[in-house]
Image (cartoon, grey):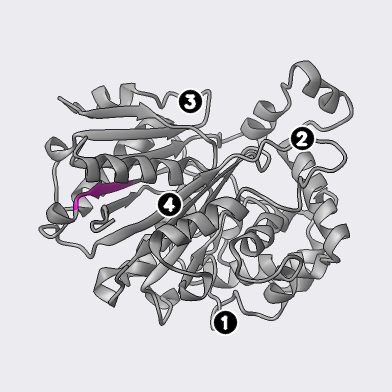
């Protein structure tokens, strides 16, 4: 490809325990912020891609709520946490093919209620299995946490990954979040703090699990020609890929050991003409400490079973050789599905991350993970102003 679609605007609402607004209201706010950041108006938008958790008021009606007219592209996209990467790829294809010229991708959610349990919305959605999977519910697998605990346990026992190494991921993420003004958790964490946190489902402690947040995030994607007239640094969309492994829970399955990242990561890097060693910034979907480690391995940043030792070495933390999840990720910053790693990557490649800005930021890889390792999306981004060229 001789041309790359460009990200020219990004908008993030208040995130965390922000009450009194619906998912659609968060989404509308995020879209307006992203469009303004791009130096555009809503009248310039001719494409809208929407990602939403089921059961909210966020749907195709957002276009009417924003008074968007004559759209050439409008759709809901949902592969759960992999959706942001899929939206980026669809928008990039659209603007490069001429299907649309200015496409906004948005996610928003409102699971937190003033008097409610922080995980109630996600626990409810994961405990209503029917058919064969109802046997899991009857056996006590009533939440996503239970199912990821099974994957994490198999990963640990197979490769000898330790609880301390999971803890090193949580500590590293928190160290980045301390300097992120939008992060929810900014109090420094020690490995002792990690071990002292309560069990959720063994081997997952509280600090192994992502936050639950209210808020919205949106980005604007357009052509390289149109990007030349926008006020903020543009970010090139250099490569993308997705993978949906379809694991079966039976003997011989790679469930928990190899993820869709093993296919999507190398494919996206190849499209960008890059190798793992060419990547400056890693923004990895970290719904759990475990998913961070297995994704780094499947992307080729280290061999299988070695990511835990990599985390324990400090390589992923501030000042480390492989800066990863530089805003604190979903473990310490905020949880807006695949938009969390994407928004931080944009900040880094624009050079606007403040105290947490890394020294080298010409390239970034962003991951998305959906379902129970069922869906994976990868995006590779480049910063033209930092001399990146395909």
Q: Which of marks 1 and 4 is in front?
A: 4
Disc 2 to disc 3, how far (Cα)? 30 Å
Q: Give the range drawn in magenta.
A: 219-223
Task: Tell me which corner region of the image, top left, top right, bottom left or bottom right, holds residue 285.
Answer: bottom right
Vertical relation: 125 (above or below) 357: above
C-alpha separation, residue under disc 4 versus residue under disc 3:
28 Å
Q: What is the quadrant of residue 308 in the picture?
A: bottom right
In this rendering, the label closer to the viewer, 1 or 2:
2
> How much space separates mark 1 and mark 2, taking CA atoms?
37 Å
Of the numbered discs in the image, which one, if any, rests on residue 240? 4
Label 3 neighbour load within 10 Å: few <14, some 14-19, many 20+: some
| Residue located beneath label 3 in the image | 56
Disc 2: which residue: 248
Mark number, residue 225:
none
Q: Quadrant of the C terminus?
A: bottom left
Q: Is residue 270 magenta?
A: no
Judging by the rendered image, the residue that carries numbered circle 1 is 320
């Amino acid at each position: 490809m001789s041309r790359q679609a460009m990200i020219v605007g990004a908008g993030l609402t208040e995130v965390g325990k922000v009450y009194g607004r619906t998912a659609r209201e968060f989404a509308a706010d995020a879209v307006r912020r992203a469009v303004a950041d791009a130096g555009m108006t809503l009248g310039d938008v001719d494409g809208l891609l929407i990602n939403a958790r089921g059961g909210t008021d966020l749907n195709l009606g957002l276009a009417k709520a924003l008074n968007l007219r004559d759209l050439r592209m409008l759709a809901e996209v949902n592969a759960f946490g992999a959706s942001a990467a899929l939206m980026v790829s669809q928008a990039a294809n659209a603007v490069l093919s001429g299907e649309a010229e200015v496409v906004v991708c948005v996610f928003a959610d409102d699971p937190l209620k003033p008097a409610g349990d922080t995980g109630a919305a996600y626990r409810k959605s994961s405990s209503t299995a029917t058919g064969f999977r109802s046997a899991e519910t009857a056996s006590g697998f009533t939440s996503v946490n239970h199912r990821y605990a099974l994957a994490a346990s198999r990963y640990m026992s197979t490769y000898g990954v330790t609880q301390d190494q999971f803890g090193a991921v949580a500590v590293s993420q928190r160290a980045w979040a301390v300097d992120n003004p939008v992060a929810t958790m900014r109090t420094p964490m020690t490995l002792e703090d990690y071990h002292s946190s309560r069990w959720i489902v063994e081997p997952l402690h509280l600090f192994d699990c992502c936050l639950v947040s209210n808020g919205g995030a949106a980005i604007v994607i357009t052509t390289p020609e149109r990007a030349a007239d926008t006020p903020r640094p543009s970010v090139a969309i250099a490569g993308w890929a997705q993978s949906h492994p379809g694991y079966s829970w039976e003997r011989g399955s790679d469930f928990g050991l190899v993820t869709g990242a093993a296919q999507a990561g190398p494919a996206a890097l190849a499209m960008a003409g890059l190798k793992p060693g060419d990547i400056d910034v890693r923004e990895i979907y970290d719904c759990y400490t475990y998913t961070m480690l297995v994704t780094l391995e499947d992307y080729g940043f280290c061999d299988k079973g070695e990511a835990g030792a990599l985390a324990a070495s400090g390589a992923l933390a501030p000042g480390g050789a492989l800066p990863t999840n530089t805003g604190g990720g979903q473990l310490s910053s905020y949880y807006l599905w695949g938009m969390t790693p994407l928004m931080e990557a944009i900040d880094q490649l624009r050079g606007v991350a403040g105290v947490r800005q890394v020294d080298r930021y010409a390239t970034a890889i962003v991951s998305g993970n959906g379902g129970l390792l069922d869906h994976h999306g990868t995006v590779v981004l480049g910063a033209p102003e930092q001399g990146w060229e395909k």
